Amino acid sequence: MTPETARKLIALGAGVAFEPGAGLAAGFLDAAYQDVGAQPADDTRLGQADLVLCVQPPSNDRLARLKSGASLIGMLHPQADAERAGLIQSRGLQAFPLERLPRTTRAQSMDVLSSQAGMAGYKATLIAAQRAPRFFPMLTTAAGTIRPSKVLVVGAGVAGLQAIATARRLGAQVEGFDVRPETREQIESLGGKFLDLGVSAVGEGGYARPLTDEERAEQQRRLGEHLRTVDVVICTAAVPGRPAPKIVSTAMARGMKPGSVIVDLAAETGGNCEATQPGEVVDLDGVLIDGPLNLASQGAVHASEMYARNVYNFVALFLKDGAVTFDWDDELLAKTRWVAA
Ligand code: NAD
């Protein structure tokens, strides 16, 4: 919740309380929340809340203090922690893990995965530009002409497309590839070139499916050769609910030119590069592999503004005149709600 969305929640008839200091790291002072009518509240008030809004899941200790029947909204990943899942169930909480929201047109204004991936893709390109020992743009100088950097973006989902757009704005020559064929047009519309590795793997819900061993071998063969010609790689490939696909082997990374940089945004789920160490920078004889974590938090102001608006738009589906009413015929509510299997 930002002061802006606190004000809008109050306008929907809610009484709004906030954890003191919660917005500080994103530049939202307690006073700004109070100015719009929200009240600071410590943990002793947790048990009074009907709706609890969060970014990451609350600690299990806090979950245990929530009122039975309270609704919990955020990136909750209930299946990632058996105790958390058990508490949600035993406390009778209505859990809405926003990462489960259907990726439909109507849900776009609530899509936290997209808003946070946009910031992550942007920052990944800036990290690459910062680490690269070269310019991104072409320059004609008195000391000669500098050729533009060649940037390859692996995976052209929301983060990948933002990485491509950002690298283009910095003047690099950009290529991208994905296993979903429709990304060709999206990459080209941003001024990038589609790198065709001859593999198409569309799965359910418009997402990618895992590659077969043969498809993976073919992708790696073609990619390995191509990597020798690029200066920067930004990895963003993911398959929902699975560890990140391994696309760049250590041998392929070692085959790149010294001074090349790989930023592996997929580090969070294991990385697209075999050599990625999540949260660390690995130097493979002059090829740097950076596996940053929680990149959206590096753009905390805008990431929080977008996240808070996503949450507000979701809450506005069921909060009217201060009262909570769930319409389970609404697929956004029904499909986002988590019920233990
Ligand atoms: P994601 O984070 O799950 O994956 C990132 C990208 O990696 C995807 O484009 C995927 O195809 C690609 N990928 C997976 N395996 C790969 C491999 N082996 N090699 C190369 N690329 C690989 O995806 P995302 O960014 O969350 O979004 C993906 C889908 O969701 C897209 O179809 C997107 O258009 C859709 N979407 C739709 C809406 C909407 O409102 N309709 C909103 C957001 C996203």
Image (cartoon, rainbow, N blue to C red):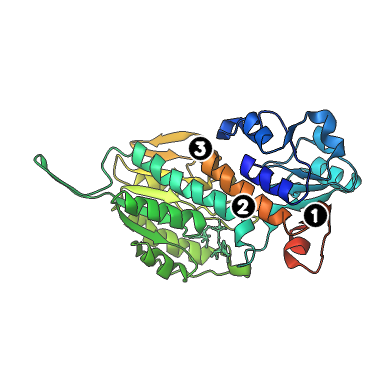
Would you call the spot at circle 3 few (<14 residues within 10 Å), some (14-19), or many (20 or more)? some
Circles 3, 1 touching at the beta carbon (< 8 Å):
no
Q: Quadrant of the C terminus?
A: bottom right
Q: CA distance from mark 2 to mark 3?
A: 16 Å
Label ID, residue 112: 2
Q: Is residue 306 left or right of residue 335?
A: left
Q: Earlier in the sequence, mark 3 or mark 1?
A: 3
x 69%, y 53%: residue = 98
Badge nearest the viewer, 1 or 2: 1
Q: Earlier in the sequence, mark 1 or mark 2?
A: 2
* Residue type, numbered disc 2: Val
Query: Which quarter holds ligand 1?
Result: bottom right
Dot 1 corresponds to which residue?
A: 321
* Residue type, numbered disc 1: Asp
Q: Is residue 162 left or right of residue 84?
A: left
Q: Is residue 285 above or below residue 174?
A: above
Badge nearest the viewer, 3 or 1: 1
Label ID, residue 298: 3
* Residue type, numbered disc 3: Gln
SS of the residue under disc 2: helix
Q: CA distance from mark 1 to mark 2?
A: 25 Å
x 73%, y 53%: residue = 315
Q: Position of residue 114 (x, y in %)?
A: 56, 55
Q: Which residue extends farthest left?
A: 142
